[in-house]
Image (cartoon, rainbow, N blue to C red):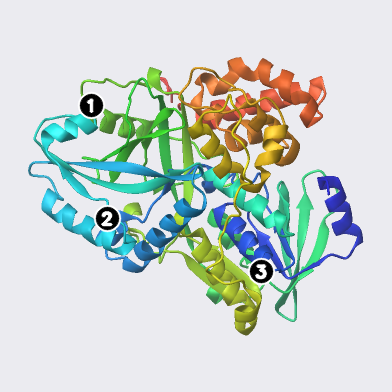
Amino acid sequence: MTRAETLKALTTDNAGFDVVVIGGGITGAGVAREAAGSGLRTLLVEQKDFSWGTSSRSSKMVHGGLRYLGSGHYGLTRDAVRERERLMAEAPGLIGPLRFIMPHFKGQFPGPRLFQLLLRAYDFIAHSPSRHFLSPAQSELWVPGLTTENLAGASGFTDAVTDDSRLVQRLIAEARRDGAICLNYTRAQEVKRSQGKVSGLVIQPEEEDTPIEVSADLVINATGAWADRLQTGGNATKAMTIRPLRGSHLVLPWSCLPVSCSVSLFHPQDRRPVFAFPWQGTTVLGTTDLDHEGSLDQEPVISEAETEYLLQIASRLFPATPISRSNILSTWAGVRPVVTDGTGKAPSKENREHSVRQDRGLISIAGGKLTTFRVIAREALKMGLGESAGSLLRPGSQAVFQTAPKLARPEQVGHQTWQRLQGYYGPDLNQLVASGPMEPVVPDRHWDLLWAELLWACKAEDVRHLDDLLLRRTRLGLILAEGGKALLPAIKLRCQAALGWDDQRWAEEETRYLGIYQSAYSLPRKESPNAS
């Protein structure tokens, strides 16, 4: 059904669901996928766009959390490493291996021996040995331009990387294939209760004047940094306290800082691991970790101090390759929904493990890692379904992703691009190929986004605003200068009809998009020295 038909059906059919999920990020999409895959009548609503929050602004890493293992969080690391291996096996092209190099400098902690011991434990958990040690000369071959000052060597190991927003979109598609209704730009207004127990949810779609009430005995609050907002009307003693922590990143042209692996270093300012890694034809520098004081309903923005923090690590790692503000293509900042005990720890010392709370039919989830979305989803559903979970939930051994159809690779599409398309679109690959030209949007670049992908997104992936298309369905707004402004006429020519927007609507969407890019995805404006 179209969105309009879906909303009409919800209004007129007295809709009832087994599970209603609030939040369209990685956790909510994971819950919807597991619930629908188990045959449960499932509705997911997201107040903005799918993956609008943290799940489009993460560090893109599908990893086991090596530093969490070093902090003693063995369970978190074990679950994450196992899920990493599973995801790479199920969705190659969407989640792929990435080599990590950690340089060691004389007199700095941790030294090579200690780090190699940590990696040995990491490999043991994964049942997949990948660690090795590099001499200073070998380190320079792996990472050209790496500083040699006091370099004692480097440790290498393998984790994985993804496009987080595409991962969410793929989960949404899988959930829908199993019958879930998933709506973006639909706000959860109120959790309804009867005699204290959850009985349903009041939702408000962006384009509707009248709210819609749906019935359900189980509501799963997977809203991340917003998780504490819906914890009212029940038992307040079970509410969790969220500490929003911001992590920001800089995006550089790959030619400016050409790295073929992720290079990490402990920042001299606070001893946090910071890294440079290749992503979609660019090089990304990240990340920071500090309290986010702004409104959660506004786009988070990198600060000037964070910008300097990340540029400092670039100059430390690659002294012969000066990086300045003028080199930066874009930025992004995400807010991590960390559950805190309120003891006033430094941001980097807060526990990253997820927390799940139950309050008579309302299950609230926060914290956790991108990698462990499935573990978290199943835990929340088991808690909500109670004794019947064993008979209702599908076996945990079943695959998260369905495989792509066996199609002949189009002649003009390279092998790597074809694998990426299979991972990104899975069973929808045949419709993608039929949706438009299999030609690159920006020829002669390291990244190979195709026009067919933009057209498929416009037709089938819930694009309601231009920023949905350019910042989340694709990442053109992040990997091109000025948010891809020069490409907008060509995108209008190809995509306007597919979106059904007239010229006035297109002009409004362009203005909206460029405003969002300037305010939240470009460098912060430096204040004048004379500013009061």
Residue at the (64%, 80%) spot, across then down = 391
Q: Alpha carbon of mark 2 to alpha carbon of mark 1: how far? A: 25 Å
Quarter of the figure with residue 309? top left
Q: Residues within 10 Å of mark 2 (few under 14, many from 20)?
A: some
Establish if 355 lies above or below 249: below
| Alpha carbon separation for disc pair 2 and 3 | 34 Å
First-in-chain label (2 vs 3) = 3
Instruction: Give the x, y percent position of residue 370.
Output: 47, 53
Identify residue type, mark 2. Pro
Compute the Cα span from label 1 to label 3. Answer: 49 Å
Circle 1 packing at 10 Å, graded few (<14), some (14-19), many (20+), is: some
N-terminal of the pair, mark 1 or mark 3, is 3
In terms of secondary structure, where does tag 1 sit? loop
How packed is label 3: few (under 14 Cα within 10 Å), some, or many (20 or more)? some
Residue 180 visible here: yes
Residue kind at label 1, given as amino acid type: Pro
| Residue topped by disc 3 | 38
User: Residue at the spot x=57%, y=72% of the render?
Assistant: 395
User: Which quadrant holds the C terminus?
Assistant: top left
Label placed on residue 129: 2
In the image, taking residue 494 as reference, residue 166 lies left or right, namely left
Give yes or no for contact between labels 2 and 3 (Cβ–Cβ under 8 Å): no
Up/down of 145 relative to 458, above or below: above
Secondary structure of the residue carrying tag 3 is: loop
Mark 1, residue position: 144
